[in-house]
Amino acid sequence: MSSSGMITMLVTEISITLITGFFFFKVLFGKPKPEPDSYSENDDVEQ
C-alpha cells in the first residue's frame, strides 16, 4: 500500500471513530427531554 493510501485510510478511520464517539457521548450523557403524557391527553373526561 502506498503512503498516500495509508494516510487516507488512517484519516478516514480516525475521523469516523471520533464522530461516532462524539454522538455516543451525547446520547449517554445528554439531558432527557420531557415527554408529554400522551395517554392523559387522549382522555375525554377530566379526573
Image (cartoon, rainbow, N blue to C red):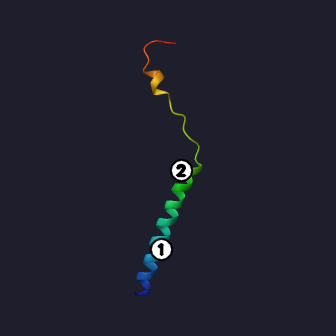
User: Which labelled disc corresponds to residue 29?
Assistant: none
Residue 38 to residue 2: above or below? above
Q: Say above or below: 9 vs 20.
A: below
Identify the amino acid type marked 1: Val
What x and y, as percent, mark residue 14?
Answer: 50, 70
The image position of residue 31, as x and y in percent, is 59, 43
Q: Nearer the viewer, mark 2 or mark 1?
A: 2
Label 1 sits on residue: 11
Q: Amino acid at mark 2?
A: Val
Q: Which residue is mark 2?
A: 27
From the viewer's side, name the closer residue of 3 and 28: 28
Name the residue located 50 percent from the left edge and 61 percent from the top edge: 19
Count of numbered badges drawn on the protein: 2
Crowding at dot 2, Cα within 10 Å, few <14 / some 14-19 / many 20+, comes out as few
Secondary-structure class at tag 2: helix
Residue at position x 49%, y 60% in the image:
20
Mark 2 / mark 1, whichever is N-terminal = 1
Q: Residue at x 46, y 80 (%)?
A: 7
Relative to 18, does residue 45 appear above or below in the rendering? above
Q: Is the Cβ of the residue at disc 2 closer than 8 Å to that at disc 1?
A: no
Which residue is painted at 42% across and 21% down in the image? 42
Alpha-carbon span between mark 2 and mark 1:
24 Å
Look at the numbered disc 1 and give the secondary structure of its residue. helix
